[in-house]
Amino acid sequence: MRNFIIASILLWPLALAPMATANTPPGNSAEQAELRDFLKKTISSADSFDDRFHAEVWLVDMSGRLARFIKKPKQRLKLLRAIHREATKAELKPDLVLALIEVESRFNEFAISSAGAQGLMQVMPFWKNEIGRPEDNLTNIDTNLSYGCRILQFYLKKEQGNWMNALARYNGSYGKYWYPERVMNAWRKRWFVRET
């Protein structure tokens, strides 16, 4: 029993952040430079909801779905607004970003993977220096979402809208589909929103 407890304590950090996000193309420095330039140009802010009714419907719906991960309603609503804002700015579906966050960090803003990826979307810290923003805090929700959504947007454009390949690139498992399947399963099971 004692060995089981010790093993559980040692493995606990891995359970918090099961994905070791790469966020970078393996061995492709031209693509890395292209992504760095894209991040520099696109990290900024704006609001995302078209109208109050749309905001209320989406926030109430998603807040109920998020309750299993985050207990406090105000905390859920604040996070959902930030996710919707950053996903919309990056031309991503907010519900797919929610699925990615569930898989990456289970909504733990302080998650750190064994590879050093940080925050909700498990962004690798080297990007801060790459884009000339070393002071950025990747455990800050807004900062992490901005980086993560823009990185995913870049890969989605690179893959001409192919979500499976874009997600595999985001995770650093390009050519393998275990990670994209996990994200898509979470999306279908919990976050999918039918277009109206």
Image: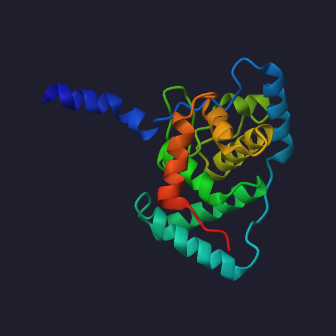
Q: Is residue 109 visible?
A: no
Left or right: 129, with 80 as reference point: right
Image quarter (top left, top right, bottom left or bottom right) of the N terminus: top left
Q: Position of residue 183 (x, y in %)?
A: 54, 46
Examine the image and state in which quarter residue 11 appears. top left
Tag count:
0
Left or right: 119, with 43 as reference point: left
Q: Position of residue 29 (x, y in %)?
A: 79, 20
Q: Residue furthest top?
A: 27
Tell me: residue 86, above or below residue 14. Answer: below
Q: How is the image coloured?
A: rainbow
180 or 85: which is nearer to us?
180
109 or 96: which is nearer to us?
96
Q: Position of residue 73 (x, y in %)?
A: 47, 70
Examine the image and state in which quarter residue 163 appears. top right
For image coordinates 66% across by 52% down, the residue present is 142
Tell me: residue 11, above or below residue 111. Answer: above
Examine the image and state in which quarter residue 89 appears. bottom right
For image coordinates 66% across by 33% down, the residue present is 169
Q: Residue furthest bottom?
A: 53
Q: Position of residue 94 (x, y in %)?
A: 65, 59
Image quarter (top left, top right, bottom left or bottom right) of the C terminus: bottom right
Q: Is residue 34 visible?
A: yes
Tell me: residue 22, above or below residue 73. Answer: above
